[in-house]
Amino acid sequence: MPVAMVDTTVEEAKARLRVRARTQRAEISAIVRADAAQAAADAFIEGITLVPSDIVAFYWPIHEEIDCKPLLARLMDKLQPICLPVVRAEDEPLEMRLWERGEPLHPSGLGTLAPSEQAPRVYPDVVLLPLLGFDATGTRLGYGGGYYDRTLAMLEKRPRIIGYAYSAQEMPAIPRQAHDLPLDAVVTEKGIRRFAPADSAA
């Protein structure tokens, strides 16, 4: 069927972009990484408005992802509710569990850490997304596993979706499919890029 052919073509294009994006991200030096993590945290604190009840979903950084832990610590200091994703199974949505300071974290698949099974399950108001790349229309290039696509699709209320990345991860254009929710904004060490609703048209 023609639709399947188009989808296959898009997936192949994304696969090529992922290889390129991984290589570019791996070339960022350790000094740049440390400075960028602090600068991105500053940009988020200064430019993203939160109310005290907003639950912010973080990720536990792996590989060469920008380190969001400096921001996580600062929001915890402000008593902002924080949750982390739990990987349930390869084809299931992530489960978001509240994480409170002092509570232990446990391995949760894919090299990540997450709160215990006893931590309350919550539904975030803001989701901080790791990514391989982003473009000027707010399209995110993920890892291809579909975890966040499934998770966001099952939420009754759409949260604010904010990419967290190095500015060097911006790409000229990323193909967007119907299930790809656009970012509301992306935070990098250079500041915040916000995307207008018109950008969300496929």
Image (cartoon, rainbow, N blue to C red):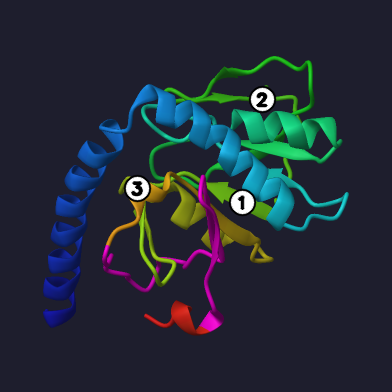
The quarter of the picture where the C terminus appears is bottom left
The stretch in magenta equals 172-197
Which residue sits at x=27%, y=32%?
Answer: 26
99 or 172: nearer the eye?
172
Which residue sits at x=36%, y=64%?
Answer: 135
The amino acid at mark 1 is: Val
Q: Residues within 10 Å of mark 1 (few under 14, many from 20)?
A: many
The residue labelled by disc 3 is 168
Spatial CA span between label 2 and label 3:
31 Å
Q: Earlier in the sequence, mark 2 or mark 3?
A: 2
The amino acid at mark 3 is: Ala
Q: Main secondary structure of the magenta part?
A: loop
The residue labelled by disc 2 is 115
Secondary element type, mark 2: loop
Q: Earlier in the sequence, mark 1 or mark 2?
A: 2
Residue 7 seen in render: yes
Q: Examine the structure image and report whether residue 181 is included in the region drawn in magenta.
A: yes
Q: Position of residue 179 (x, y in %)?
A: 40, 68
182 or 195: nearer the eye?
195
The residue labelled by disc 1 is 127
Q: Position of residue 25 (x, y in %)?
A: 30, 38
Q: Give left or right: position of 124 versus 11.
A: right
